[in-house]
Amino acid sequence: MMHRNQVKLLKEMMQADQFEIADRFANLPRACRLPVAAESREMIWADMIWIPPIKDKFVVLLAHSDTIWNDALVDLFFHDGRLLTNSLLTGTGADCRAGCAALWALRSTGHAILLTTGEESGCVGVSQMKSQYPEIIAAMSKAIALVEFDRRGKSEVVSYSHCTEDDLRIDMANDLGFTAGYGSFTDVVELESLTEVQGVNLAVGFYNEHTNEETLVVDDWWHTVSLVKKWLRNRVPKLEQYCWRKATLISSGKSYFDCWGDDDVDFMSNDLDQPVEQFESACPDCGELVEYYLDTAGDDLRYCTVCGWTNKDDEDDEDDDWLQSSNLFDKDIDADNQDWFGIDDESNGNCSKGGNCG
Ligand SMILES: [Zn+2]
Ligand SMILES: [Zn+2]
């Protein structure tokens, strides 16, 4: 269902330049500016913005503020549920102002926010974080998951380096009713290796990115944003702190290209960064061998190498319909709809780089 405020927010994000977007996020409570060093005189980047979480169990929500159009002024119009431009020279910048708008809509959830820049130029911003902002990386390492909004289309969740059956990508696809796929490269890939926390990239309704026919389908954007808000509110609090960390360790050092055609058995048992204890018994589902692991948090994770059964599935069964009973959630979202879009937060003043931002 179209909402006037959704279109207004998206237009504002798409017509701003990356500096204005950074300022908008920097004015939120507890926001920290993370200046990015220019790699050449031609390229000047807006600050990245980090907003630490309020919640103990938190997800890092991220998107990039730069576009491939280098802040060219975009003449937008709204037609048939889409935001479009007549320009022959530039696209709309929906990649990834759609993601910026998603972060804005989710800014009051208590989860961490990272607005990045330089993604279109080789993930320049996040690449500098290891040396420039180790305290932010340390804070992000405590996250349950990294969730980026920078994927074309609708209802898709992609990851980049995980091939186990019980990874974040599959779980989120099940939770949100999305399809699970693989992507090539974006900010979250770099951040996964820096934090060892699993990440995914979600479709946010843009199409034909990097062309002058770049469009944004507002309903497709809203579909992802509203479902993620429910997921953050209802699903994340029930998750175990390190539920998806093990798969990161399993797959680290392998790109997704390595995983195609790989036998899961080999994949599960080789190339582990850290030794994990391993046990064996019969699978309660298919009767075949089950491998037991202890993950880094000391919880046991059991995985059948034949049928894909995990003990985690059993625990999750009772939660399977958490999204279906959605009347309740819809009411919640409608009730605070106004708060999503305006600047309703009081600024407590911002800290500069470093300090106690983490
Ligand atoms: Zn992008
Ligand atoms: Zn792009």
Image: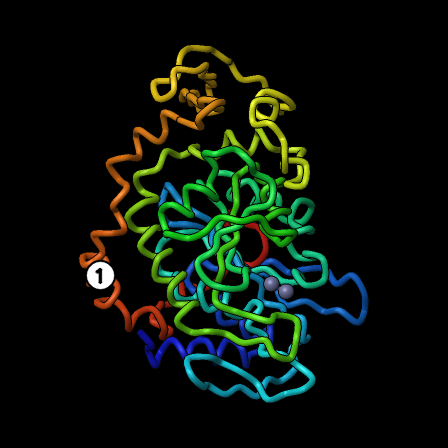
Q: As rendered, which of 36 and 275 lies closer to the eye? A: 275
- Is there any visible trace of residue 26 in the rendered image? no
Identify the residue shown where x is 48% and y is 37%.
167
* Residue 200 in sight in this render: yes
Tell me which corner region of the image, top left, top right, bottom left or bottom right, holds residue 103. Answer: bottom left
Q: Is residue 221 above or below residue 311?
A: below
Q: Is residue 78 left or right of residue 176?
A: right
Residue 53, compared with residue 258, is above or below; it is: below
Q: Residue furthest front?
A: 286
On the image, the x and y values in percent for residue 252 come to 62, 33
Residue beneath disc 1:
332
Give percent across and percent down for residue 290: 44, 16
Amino acid, disc 1: Asp
For residue 268, above or below residue 358: above
Please give the name of the residue rendered at 48% of the width and 44% of the height, measured from the top-left corner.
Answer: 169
Please state which of residues 258 and 238 is positioned toward the viewer in this rendering. Answer: 258
Residue 192 is situated, as x and y percent measured from the top left of the image, at 58, 42
- The mark tally for this picture is 1
